[in-house]
Image (spheres, grey):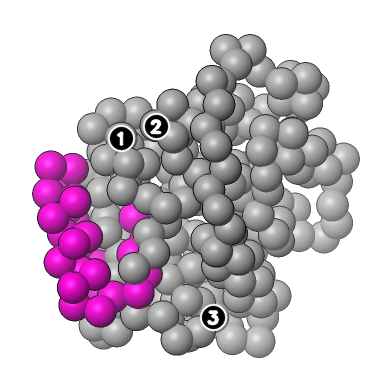
Amino acid sequence: MRKIAFVTQKGGAGKSTLASSVAVAARQAGERVFIIDLDPLQTLVNWSRARGVADIAVEHVPPAKLSKALAALAAKGVTLAIIDAPGQEGDYFSAAVRAADLCVIPARPNAFDLWASEITRMRVKEKGKDYAFLLNQCPPAQQSARVELGAKALQAMGGLLAPLVSSRVDYQEAARLGRGVGEYNPDGVAAEEMRELWASIKRRLKKPASAAKTPSAKPTKAVRNAA
């Protein structure tokens, strides 16, 4: 069973929205998916209630029980566990990172999110875990200079998943209805973004984890320039 965790040190980056739509894309691609909602707010538990079907199970699990829960899921034949952690450091964040094969770090294309992403990267590397960045909520009309600079900053910090995810109404409407964008509007651009994103994550999971290095306490030049 493969395990991915959506983690960041800053709220508002779209972790839960991404986790739900990636889960749907993975299920549609043939995975047996289970979502673990580590956030005390239980956003994805509420998403599951709105969904009303049990094809993708969602459960809130406290950090102390995460390891045991994952072992039970693997024994039941689940092939993909998606962990949604709260946007702050603490026991929930640490448990998610320790459990994951890959930590996905979403960030919006602005200086505050990019600074927070570097802090998250440092914490993930301290625990010896593999990670990849995801640039989310980008302007859909065109790739602005701000988005391009954000992409360069994340690439400089160690890898960026494809594609850049646009800010689209489909994501919000799908989440409200307990759906992924691949169900809400299967032929839409957002649905195609999530199919591409799942394919990108799957490829990354097949690669050997990069060796963790001692993180620098100073932000990279690209991140400083993003301000």
* Residue placed most toward the observer, 62 or 87: 62
Tag in front: 2 or 3: 2
Cα distance in 3D space between marks 2 and 3: 34 Å
The magenta region covers 57-83
Residue 85 drawn in magenta: no
Is residue 69 rendered to the left or right of residue 198? left
Mark 3 or mark 1, which has the lower sequence index? 1
**Circles 2, 1 touching at the beta carbon (< 8 Å):** yes
Q: Is residue 146 visible?
A: no
Residue at (49%, 68%) from the top-left corner?
A: 22
Q: Is residue 191 visible?
A: yes
Q: Using the image, tell me which numbered label, if any, was put on residue 182.
A: 3
Mark 2 or mark 3, which has the lower sequence index? 2
**Circles 3, 1 touching at the beta carbon (< 8 Å):** no
Residue at (75%, 53%) from the top-left corner?
A: 139
Measured from the top left, where is residue 132 in percent x and y?
58, 47
> Compared to 223, does 110 lie above or below?
below
- What residue sits right under mark 1 in the picture? 94
* Residue placed most toward the observer, 189 or 63: 63
Residue 73 drawn in magenta: yes
Q: Quadrant of residue 146?
A: top right
Q: Secondary structure at mark 1?
A: helix
Three-letter code, disc 1: Ser
> Compared to 30, does 57 lie above or below?
above
Q: Quadrant of residue 54?
A: bottom left
Measured from the top left, where is residue 20 in percent x and y?
42, 66
* Residue placed most toward the observer, 206 or 197: 206
Three-letter code, disc 2: Lys
> Compared to 118, does 16 lie above or below?
below
